[in-house]
Image (spheres, rainbow, N blue to C red):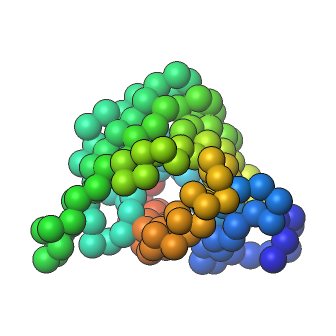
Amino acid sequence: MTTMQNHETRYTEAVIEPDEKVPAIHIWRDFAATPAQLFRAHTDRDLFARWSGPSSVGAEITEWDARDGGSWRYTARGVEGRDDFETSFHGCFHTVREDRIVQTFTWDGMPDEVALETMTFEDLGDGRTRLHAFSLCDSFEGRDAWLRSGMEVGVHDGYAAIDRLLADGTL
């Protein structure tokens, strides 16, 4: 696949692909939402906790300051019979604007692999927005480990939860 995407392409499900040239992961997903709605989903503490991650996991946010220079931390805990599951993530917000969020992302399970994530919200018109997340990892090995980690379950489940929040008028 190519990392050049165009307006004609539609991403009704998340597309997750490694970059061919740098140790990075691209994620594209289109939503029936405005950029402001997607921005709110990613910066509002309570909303983020409602959609982030796999549906079998809940997020307990222990730190959340979604502003330039702010930081965040949350623990994902198993629900629905997954009581033995727990893992944590943390990072710092570098840029927080309605069309762009830049942050670091660290999974405590791989503390030496810090990703720099840039997320953009592109208005496609007709009430649709394309989310593009670009996660630059420390190494190709670290990137590939993230791709093997099962992250796609959390991405797909989380974005489906955003769709539900949009459909029920929460967002």
Which of the two residues, 127 or 57, is positioned nearer the viewer here?
57
Closest to the observer, 163 or 159: 159
Above or below residue 15? Residue 46 is above
From the viewer's perspective, is residue 20 above or below residue 107? below
Q: Is residue 48 above or below residue 14?
A: above
Q: With respect to residue 93, does 9 lie above or below?
A: below
Indicate the quadrant where residue 23 lies. bottom right
Res 20 quadrant in image: bottom right
Q: Position of residue 49 (x, y in %)?
A: 32, 51
Q: Does residue 169 appear in the picture of this structure? A: yes
Give the quarter of the figure containing the C terminus. Answer: bottom left
Residue 107 in percent (x, y) is at 41, 50
Residue at the location (27% across, 66% down)?
A: 57
Residue located 50% across and 26% down the image: 67
Q: Report the label total.
A: 0
Task: From the top left corner, tell me how far across and down residue 19 is, in percent.
Answer: 76, 63
- Residue 127 in view, yes or no: no
- Say which quadrant the N terminus sits in: bottom right
Report x, y in % for residue 51.
Answer: 38, 60
Query: Foreground residue, 36 or 24?
Result: 24
Task: Name the residue: 60% across, 77% down.
Answer: 13
The structure residue drawn at horizontal position 63% and vertical position 77%, both measured from the top left corner, is 12
